[in-house]
Image (tube, rainbow, N blue to C red):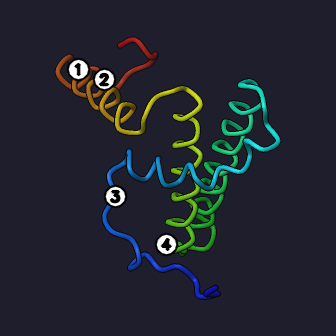
Amino acid sequence: MSTEEPSNKNFSILSLDQYQLHASSTAIYKDTCKTFKERISYVGLGLSGEAGEIANKTKKLLRDKELDKEALIAELGDVLWYLAMTCNELDTTLNEVANINLYKLKRRQQKGTLKGKGDNR
């Protein structure tokens, strides 16, 4: 068994749905989180935690005037994993979520409501 760190050179370009499928094989939380409520709570809290780590790293840019780009990219990967697992729990795909979001943004753009308050604009 190799102890070598995986490199991004070892992976081919994946679609969002392919990523979601492959990432699902690493979802060990299902061993302890048996109910939907437990699983959706776990992935929701994980997503929030990882987003908080991104916020903290970008905050340090204001303080230190430096950005650890590699660390930020790694955290984005963690956010993507939790987002993919959240999609799994909701029986949807990353691709579907991306398409729904783009449709919403295009409608807001056409209506001139990209800026504004509220979800229904």
Tag 2 residue: 104
Q: Crowding near pointer 3: few (<14 within 10 Å), some, many (20+)?
A: few
Determine whether 72 is above or below 66 in the image.
Answer: above
Mark 4 vs mark 1: which is more N-terminal?
A: 4
Q: Which mark is residue 14?
A: 3
Tag 1 residue: 107
Residue lying farthest to the left in this orientation: 110
Residue lying farthest to the right in this orientation: 32
Q: Amino acid at mark 4?
A: Lys
- Does the CB distance between marks 2 and 4 fall below 8 Å? no
Q: Position of residue 47 (x, y in %)?
A: 63, 43
Mark 4 vs mark 3: which is more N-terminal?
A: 3
Which secondary structure, mark 1?
Answer: helix
Left or right, 113 with reference to 64: left
Left or right, 15 with reference to 63: left
Mark 3–mark 1 distance (CA, rounded to whole Å): 28 Å
